């Protein structure tokens, strides 16, 4: 199996399902005790907008999401949502719910923390 396919296969086990299906891993950085994974939304027009004749129009500002640690490293997902425009200049995008309400944790990680501790420790912005 070639290297790209191996990396793609590994991401299915490491990243949240919605991320694997709709985002592409574009960069990985290690800094101290943190592993930063950079993800861009794939250029797949949402089904509800297929008849609108949309063109890609860059990305929204990146969002940082805390996810499960890997090998004693904090994991931060840096997610950029895609934006499309129609011929009149109106902007469209998917409405993602990648984090647990009121937190910067992935939904799965927040659920795990709440089950393990009964609450979400330090749900403040990423430091």
Image (cartoon, rainbow, N blue to C red):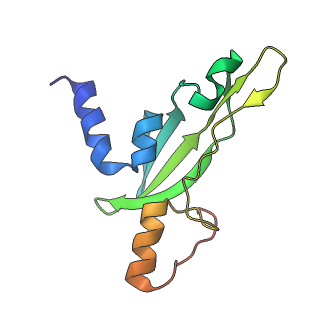
In the rendered view, does 84 fall on the left or right side of 17? right
Q: Position of residue 67 (x, y in %)?
A: 44, 59
Q: Is residue 46 visible?
A: no
Quarter of the image containing the N terminus?
top left
Percent coordinates x, y for residue 51 in the rendering = 66, 19
- Relative to 70, is 79 on the left or the right? right
Q: Nearer the viewer, residue 78 or 32?
A: 78
Whether 19 is drawn above or below 6: the answer is below
- Residue 88 or residue 12, whichever sits in front: 88
Could you tell me residue 28's position as x and y percent?
Answer: 41, 39
User: Which residue, as the protein is rendered here, is positioned at the far right?
Assistant: 88
Q: How many marks?
A: 0
Q: Classify 18 as above or below 126.
A: above
Specify the quadrant of the image occupied by residue 32: bottom left
The picture quadrant where one finds residue 117 is bottom left
- Residue drawn where x is 40% and y is 79% of the image: 115
Quadrant of the rendering where the C terminus is positioned = bottom right
**Residue drawn at (61%, 66%) of the image:** 101
Nearer-the-camera pick, 95 or 69: 95
Residue 107 appears in the figure: yes
Residue drawn where x is 62% and y is 48% of the image? 63
Q: Residue at x 39, y 47 (%)?
A: 17
């Amino acid at each position: 199996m070639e290297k790209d396919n191996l990396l793609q296969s590994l991401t299915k086990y490491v990243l949240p399902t919605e991320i694997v299906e709709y985002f592409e891993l574009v960069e990985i950085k290690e800094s101290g005790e943190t592993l930063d994974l950079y993800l861009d939304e794939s250029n797949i027009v949402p089904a509800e907008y297929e008849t609108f004749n949309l063109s890609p129009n860059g990305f929204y500002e990146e969002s940082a999401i805390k996810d499960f640690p890997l090998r004693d490293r904090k994991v931060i997902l840096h997610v950029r949502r895609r934006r499309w425009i129609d011929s009149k200049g109106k902007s469209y995008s998917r409405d993602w719910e990648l984090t647990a309400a009121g937190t910067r944790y992935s939904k799965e990680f927040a659920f795990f923390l709440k089950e393990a501790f009964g609450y979400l420790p330090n749900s403040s912005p990423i430091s």
